[in-house]
Amino acid sequence: LIKPEEDKKQISINQIRKLQEPLYQSSFLGSNKVFIINPLEKMSREASDSFLKNLEEPPDNSIFLLISHRYQTLPLTIKSRAIKVNMNQPDNEQIKAWLNLQTEHKSNIETALLLSKGKPFVAAEMVNFEIDDLRLNFIKDVSELIKTGNNLLEISEQWPKDHMTMLLKLEWMSDLLMDCLRHRFLPEQNLTFQDSDSISSYLSQHFESDNFFYLLEKTNSCWNLFNSDTNLRADYQLQSLLV
């Protein structure tokens, strides 16, 4: 199993290099060798380029299980050399029962289940973030930003103090922008997040769709940037996004 090392954001090229010895060793009893990379999108660019060589010419009886939670962000060079298998998601009741066994933060389960969009492992991470308070603070920040813009510098300074919750808030920004578009194009289907519906409804009535598409692209780019080992200052990038 290859995953980001403790206190690291990404799977490094050194971790991929360490694959070479077990990869090219003869398998005990001649059975298959299975290597799991999870999550695949956490590989650094150098690691991804190095791993590509293994995908192009894998040794006999070698199987790579590449697990990704953000398939759209994967390099095309890797996508084209792998077979995509979509896993069926459990229903909400199954996820809720599983979460109750995983955490002591029972009060956060409903919110985590809603915001994770049915992804159990994402929900399991959320319940440990005091997700109810985090979500309320996010909505408060965005509401004030839209009304006055006076908290722009405060958001830019406060959000980056916790890297994981900053990424989560950027995902919520993307969800909010998607809800603005849903109000525009699918108003009758009631697909928006209810706790932020007043914000997305207001924005959809006062701005053009092109604005939402543009901001959605910028927000996703910002998330990808912060999810990598960038040396760019997060506060400056957030100011550029939110201004």
Image: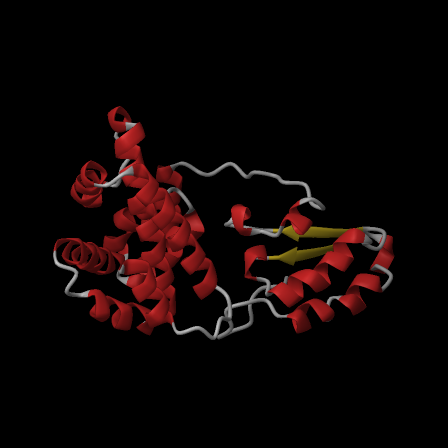
Residue shown at 82% from the left, 51% from the top: 61
Task: Tell how many labels.
Answer: 0
Task: Tell me, yes or no, if residue 116 can be seen here.
Answer: no
Left or right, 188 with respect to 46, comes to left
Q: Residue 137, image x and y in percent?
A: 19, 60
In the image shown, does 53 or 2 lie closer to the viewer?
A: 53
Left or right, 105 with respect to 216, comes to left
Q: Quadrant of the C terminus?
A: bottom left
Location of residue 196 with respect to 186 vertically, above or below: below
Q: Residue 100, image x and y in percent?
A: 34, 51
Location of residue 108 with respect to 198 vertically, above or below: below
Residue shown at 72% from the left, 46% from the top: 81
Task: Tell me, yes or no, if residue 89 can be seen here.
Answer: yes
Q: Quadrant of residue 50?
A: bottom right
Q: Residue 36, image x and y in percent?
A: 65, 56
The chosen color scheme is secondary structure
In the image shown, does 130 or 232 lie closer to the viewer?
A: 232
Location of residue 61 with respect to 43 vertically, above or below: above
Q: Quadrant of the N terminus?
A: bottom right
Residue shown at 18% from the left, 58% from the top: 145
Residue shown at 70% from the left, 52% from the top: 64
Q: Quadrant of residue 108?
A: bottom left
